[in-house]
Amino acid sequence: MGRSPCCDESGLKKGPWTPEEDQKLVKYIQKHGHGSWRALPKLAGLNRCGKSCRLRWTNYLRPDIKRGKFSPEEEQTILNLHSILGNKWSAIATHLPGRTDNEIKNFWNTHLKKKLIQMGFDPMTHRPRTDIFSSLPHLIALANLKELMDHQLSWEEQALKLQSEAVQIAKIQYLQYLLQPTTTTSPQPISMPPCTSNNISDLEALNLLNSLSSIKDNIHQTPNPSQFETNNDINIQTLNESVPFACLPELQIPCSFSCPLDSENMFQASTMTVLSQGENSNSPHSPGFLTASSSSPTSSSHIIAPPLTDPMTTNNNSINNNQGDACSTSSSYGGLGLWPVDCLLEDPLFHEIA
DNA sequence: AAAGCGCGCAACCGCCGGTCT
DNA sequence: GAGACCGGCGGTTGCGCGCTT
């Protein structure tokens, strides 16, 4: 079919807009609204095509346009949204008030894209260019547990820390899941595109990577069991050998421990489990979510990590049904610059695309 | 001082989907 | 149902500006 571009008409001006033209356009739209863009130029006394007028208005003259540099928050938002939406600039722009799709697109092409490349990420897929992350979850988990054992922490501190660790592990597992080549034996929805949601930010990944340099020397040290009152369900060695970090989505990391609850030295068991794909029948969450939970007699909480399936194909109900449960303690991992899971689930975008 | 170069950004272009006739 | 119209979107271009050599 096709149709000729509206600007094919001869005699219509192209190129940069003059202040006079801007003034005419603004004046007309303020008085009459834009109405039909095709008819607008004649009515406004402009020798331009309607398309040019629309672009000039939406990208430059609109009164609600925010100009100037992008803030770090905006930058992070763009990165996160781009990892989910790809080059859907208009969709991204709806989440950045005052910013136009054109501006975001330009910012991406001139700044963020290069930044990601410099960081070793493919800007289109948000995936690392190497397999450097293959051992990341393992190393971090070991390092974090080592840290737990090295410090005499209160039960509350331990619970909080473990919960935080679980969040990280879940997120990294998700990243790792995304990093898997499509030839993996893990079942994947056919509809899952090669470049999809990556809810771990790239900056975060870099932070985590950097943090490894300082902890990697310690992770193979033999732990001193006396430093940690456990029921021996976990220790570094066991974890090292048994935790199949690299075999998502079958992964399951149980780790339970006992801890002093009060002055009477009463010990109670608590559990911290990271489940993949919500396969546990007891899980209150629908399949497709990573679940990490911790509980104690005094409190219990859990987080829901991003779905393992592509959000584009995730059933709407499954998300809504979980909204009430999404009560993570984002503060426990906010310091790492992680994407708070509760924020993700509260984000209208997340539901919009689901 | 001038030429070369890279960068940022406004604007253009072609295509697509929705709506109307 | 087909074609025209329209608005919108994403990719690309080209110009102006500042920095470097």
Image: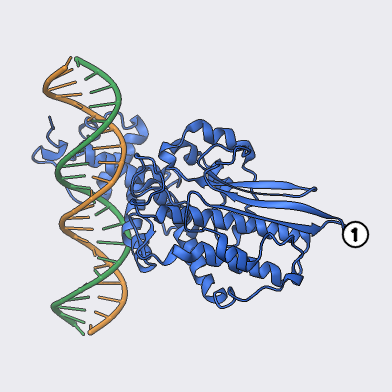
Chain colours: A blue, B green, C orange
Name the amino acid, label 1. Answer: Ser
Judge from the rendering whether residue A47 lies leftward or rightward of residue A135; answer left or right.
Answer: left
> Which of the two residues, A352 or A20, is positioned nearer the viewer here?
A352
Image location (x, y in percent) of residue A25: 29, 40
Judge from the rendering whether residue A272 lies leftward or rightward of residue C7; answer left or right.
Answer: right
Residue at the spot x=61%, y=47% of the render?
Answer: A303
Q: Quadrant of residue A61?
A: top left
> Which of the two residues, A73 or A141, is positioned nearer the viewer here?
A141
Q: Quadrant of residue A142?
A: bottom right
Identify the image quadrant of the N terminus of chain A.
Answer: top left
> Which of the two residues, C9 or A165, is positioned nearer the viewer here?
A165
> Which of the two residues, A129 or A60, is positioned nearer the viewer here?
A129
Name the element at disc 1: loop
Image location (x, y in percent) of residue A253: 59, 54
**Which residue, given by chain and number where applicable, does mark 1 sit on?**
A263
Q: Is there any visible trace of residue A61 in the rendered image? A: no
Judge from the rendering whether residue A329 lies leftward or rightward of residue A58; answer left or right.
Answer: right
